[in-house]
Image (tube, rainbow, N blue to C red):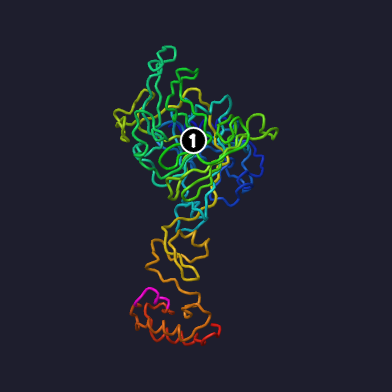
Amino acid sequence: MRLARLATAVLVLGLFATAVWADSWCATRYPAALFCDDFDRYCDDPPPLPQECGLGYNILALWRVWIPQGSCGAAITLDDGYLSSPPYAGRAPSPDTGQLAYDTLGLTSPVRAKFGEQYTSVLATDETPLTFEFVVNGKTLSKIHHDNAFLELANGTPYVLNKDALTLWIPSPYCDEQCGNAAIGHNAYPIICQQNDAPAGCASIATAPPRSSIAVGAMAYLDPDPCHCSASDHFPTNKHLAVFDGQRWWSLRQGLFPGGGTGGAVPGDFWLGDLQNKVVLTIKLAAMKVEMTWAGADNLFGTSDDQYSWCTMPRIYQGPFNKITMGYHIPCELIPGTWNCTGAADCNGPTQKDTVCCVTGAPGGGTITFDNVALDGGQGYVQPGACCFPDTSCVEAYEGDCRVLGGQFAGGGTTCDAVACCPPLPADHDMDGDVDLEDFGWFQSCLSGPRALPWTIPCQCADFNHDTGVDADDLATFLIHMSGPEIPAN
């Protein structure tokens, strides 16, 4: 019902103006990306790439791509005021004191289009890294420091009963009681437990359940002491970019991981600034490089240096991805000291207003928008398998890595112990450039008869016609290629 009312309002406002077409950011920056969205082509009958829609948009077209999830909050919408490439950006659902929610975008269709119909997810490795780029915009007046919204690369089905969220929480103390000051207000706030140095009341982070995802964004609810009794803002605050590694959130600060940066009061500190914060993750198999560039109000037009931070951090989840989510997971409240939910009947904690454990945003936050979201690189995912090289050596690798390294992939789930890696000219078994009696001795030892399996895995290379037996037909082929010692084989 909420979505229908919003769609009707959009139509009544008459936003379908005459389009002023221009080159889209995606077509210019990432023309061959696995997925790219600058939120500029959600209109009726969008023009062919590389052109954007112009001034009019169709919100239902947006929701067919970014699908609203759950019954909390509002769906992602479009914003025409805080963006990186005109005319629109994606506005995160209810980032302020409204109910927080999220939308999901499936990657299976883009993966099949780029890598082949047999693939349903994308994998990042050292040989085929993924680049995940976007801009997060937190308006002005440091409101982003009190916001909660992130972009996530994930794998699997939709989250089940809130317990798979990246935002499981315990309530903070009531701030007036904590601080001994009634003027502060009788408030308590969620504290996310899945973070480095888990706060008091949470279970050990070492026992946190792993998740099939990585995520990055602004996360005020990582604040372990949201009351701030000695400060003026008595609500959750986090001034640093937050990254989820597959098990825990990290608020990135200078020196936390190897890295550095330029510009700013503390170079390399990942301080979230007003307006545009450009984030780039270069994802490899076991690690990822995180980069963030802040373009503040005085340097949007290049009048001063940007503030740039980078670091390299471990990646706990090392599997593939088949979806992107935007917003804030619908979580459950935890039983203190455990990773178990309190249960639906008890989920309405001190910050809750409705059922299904809907969490509201923190006071002091603003509208968060995401723009220029791009995912590029990687490989179509299948299980690792045997990878054969021209020198007949074998390693077990992912298919894309095998191809990049110059090998031949034997198939997902195969092993080097069960796969024969044959020479480029199979009859030249010793690979000395000729086919002579030395090679014949090997071939003779492999003779097994019609439709009789070769005795050993290497003898599969003597089955020239691939009929599962090394027999007279294969002997005839061998004799055709036999040239003699030091006579180059054909």
Q: Residue at x 34, y 37 (%)?
A: 161
Along the line of sight, which residue is nearer the eye, 416 or 157? 416
Residue 456 lies in the magenta stretch: yes
Find the residue positioned furthest to the top: 182
Q: Which region shows up in magenta?
A: 455-461
Q: Position of residue 235 (x, y in %)?
A: 46, 22
Q: Position of residue 424 (x, y in %)?
A: 50, 74
Quarter of the figure with the C terminus: bottom right
Question: Is residue 134 something that shows in the picture?
Answer: no
Q: Which residue is drawn at 52% across and 51% down?
A: 129
Q: Position of residue 261 (x, y in %)?
A: 59, 38
Along the line of sight, which residue is nearer the eye, 466 or 291? 291
Quarter of the figure with the N terminus: top left
Residue 22 lies in the magenta stretch: no
Identify which amino acid the numbered label 1 is placed on. Ala
Q: Name the residue under label 1.
A: 242
Q: Position of residue 211 (x, y in %)?
A: 39, 43
